[in-house]
Image: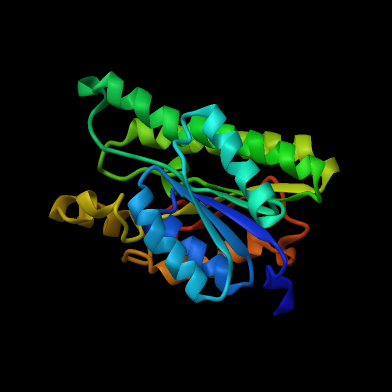
Amino acid sequence: MTSFRLDGRVAVVTGASSGLGAHFAVVLARAGADVVVAARRADMLATVAAAVEAEGRRCLAVPTDVTDAAACSTLIDAAVDGLGGVHVVVNNAGTGYGGRSDRDDLAQTERLFDVNLRGAYQVAAAAGRAMIAGEGGSIVNVSSALALATTDVPQAAYSASKAGLLGMTRDLARQWARHGIRVNALAPGFFSSELTAPLLAHERGAASVRAATPLGRVGRLDELDGPLLLLASDAGSYITGTTLSVDGGMAMH
């Protein structure tokens, strides 16, 4: 369907060096977008950029630490100056860990919030400025089913950071609607990725995921393609301020 296409648009994906971010970059390219890929690991970004270019689209790889506000502005400027604008932002950079809060490493917790919440806010703010000055656009904040539900594995800090993204999403959607900017959240359940690998490698963790997911399995990355494109493209032109759960029923359960 043509409304799901992104021809002539520029998309920025953070946390694009591996996992969901790398997958999202290629999905957006297949839909016709030129893509800016951003992450801290420059060597891995080069591989993702090559995959985007193999789809016939232009790609810029911009090493970026989202906890640095100036770097977030530089990233968006690179999209505007290098590819002609910014129309879609997938705010995907994130980190996580599990563990009981009464035994928590507060330095690790601070780093998690810096990346997952403050970093996402800084990217969104920089993108919002560019989109207000340009043609509007779509921001997709990648949250988590753990913002809406729990498992037997304690992950309070991660869940809190991802729940914070949902409040941020609603408020930014309200602020920027008059500028033609849609802001939504995508809340994946458990998918095989670098971030989830430690949890899924342990029988207790894998069993917890199955028990918390009514469909009883880990998701396939391609099952995120349609939801992502719905929020990023004109197919979702009347959707803003919402959270789309793609979690095998986990939030319901």
Front-most of 169 and 55? 55
Please provide percent x and percent y for residue 96.
Answer: 33, 39
Asked whether residue 231 appears in the rendered view, the answer is: yes
* Whole-percent x, y for residue 103 in the image: 20, 22
In this view, 7 is above or below 59: below
Residue in the image at 46% along x and 62% along y: 49
Q: Is residue 37 left or right of residue 212?
A: right
- Would residue 19 appear left or right of 29 to someone viewing this image? left
The answer to whether 39 appears left or right of 172 in the picture is left
Q: Is residue 61 above or below residue 241?
A: below
Task: Determine the residue positioned at 52% across, 34% down.
Answer: 71
In this view, which residue lies farthest toward the bottom? Answer: 1
Q: Give the vertical position of 181 relative to 217 (above or below).
A: above
Q: Quadrant of residue 34?
A: bottom right
Q: Is residue 80 left or right of residue 75?
A: right
Residue furthest toward the left? 203
Residue at x-position 40% and y-position 37%: 159
Say which quarter of the image contains residue 45: bottom left
Residue 133 in picture, x, y percent from top left: 81, 41
**Can residue 248 be seen at all in this image of the molecule?**
no
